[in-house]
Image (cartoon, grey):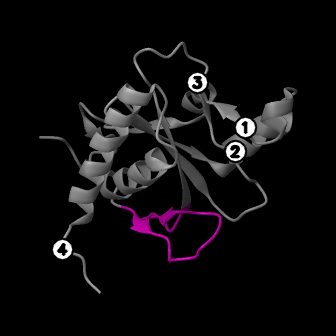
């Protein structure tokens, strides 16, 4: 069955609904940022979605074959910092993680990429309990990863730009 709506149009509506919900209710609409971020990462980084039902990773980079987990975090202008990303499960098969950072309107502002090796090394050496369980702050992910896309300049590898 086909739908009369395009994925881009539905995601735009989800962005607007999530932003309005947060403004009205004072809290984020659960689960929406994950869907929006997955759509954005696949579109902006030209990734291929993982097959339906595939566990452990969300997309594949057709240039390298890397299996990629997609994480998201909306950074709101009234936040005090200390944002964390979802748990990284080292017992699953994946090669890298991309973190899509979004603004108050759930628009992507930056995307960072970190390899499994760099993340695993940090988590193995971490003394903090949360890090040992695979939890990590956005600030730490930015340090360990590399910026691969931003809203001003587009892709950082020269293959795509916002012009």
**Percent position (x, y) of residue 100?**
44, 41
Residue range (magenta)? 47-67
Mark seen at residue 21: none
Separation of disc 4 and disc 3 at Cα? 40 Å
**Percent position (x, y) of residue 45?**
35, 53
Location of residue 108 (image quadrant): top left
Residue 109 visible in the shown view: no
Q: Are marks 2 and 4 in contact (CB under 8 Å)?
A: no
| Left or right placement of residue 163 versus residue 143 in this view | left
Residue at numbered disc 4: 4
Could you tell me which secondary element the residue under label 3 belongs to? helix
Could you tell me which secondary element the residue under label 4 belongs to? loop
Q: Let me know if residue 57 is in the magenta part.
A: yes
Separation of disc 1 and disc 3 at Cα? 12 Å
Separation of disc 2 and disc 3 at Cα? 15 Å
Residue at numbered disc 2: 87
**Percent position (x, y) of residue 137?**
64, 28
Could you tell me which secondary element the residue under label 1 belongs to? loop
Which of 145 and 86 lies nearest the eye of the viewer?
86
Separation of disc 2 and disc 1 at Cα? 5 Å
Q: Residue at x 24, y 30 (%)?
A: 152
Separation of disc 2 and disc 4 at Cα? 36 Å
Residue at numbered disc 1: 135
Dominant secondary structure, magenta:
loop
Could you tell me which secondary element the residue under label 2 belongs to? loop
Q: Residue at x 25, y 50 (%)?
A: 13
Q: Are marks 2 and 1 in contact (CB under 8 Å)?
A: yes
Q: Is residue 81 above or below residue 63?
A: above
Residue at numbered disc 3: 139
């Amino acid at each position: 069955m086909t739908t009369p709506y395009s994925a881009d149009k539905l995601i735009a509506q989800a962005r607007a609904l999530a932003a309005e919900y947060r403004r009205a209710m004072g809290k984020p609409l659960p689960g929406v940022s994950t869907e929006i971020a997955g759509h954005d990462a696949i579109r902006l980084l030209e990734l291929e979605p993982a097959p339906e039902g595939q566990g452990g990773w969300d997309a594949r980079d057709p240039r390298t074959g890397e299996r990629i987990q997609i994480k998201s975090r909306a950074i709101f202008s009234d936040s005090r910092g200390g944002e964390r990303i979802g748990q990284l499960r080292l017992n699953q098969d994946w090669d890298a993680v991309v973190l899509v950072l979004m603004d108050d309107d759930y628009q992507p502002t930056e995307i960072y990429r970190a390899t499994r090796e760099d993340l695993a090394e940090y988590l193995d050496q971490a003394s903090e309990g949360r890090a040992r369980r695979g939890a990590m702050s956005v600030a730490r992910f930015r340090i360990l990863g590399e910026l691969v896309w931003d809203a001003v300049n587009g892709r950082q590898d020269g293959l795509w730009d916002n012009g």
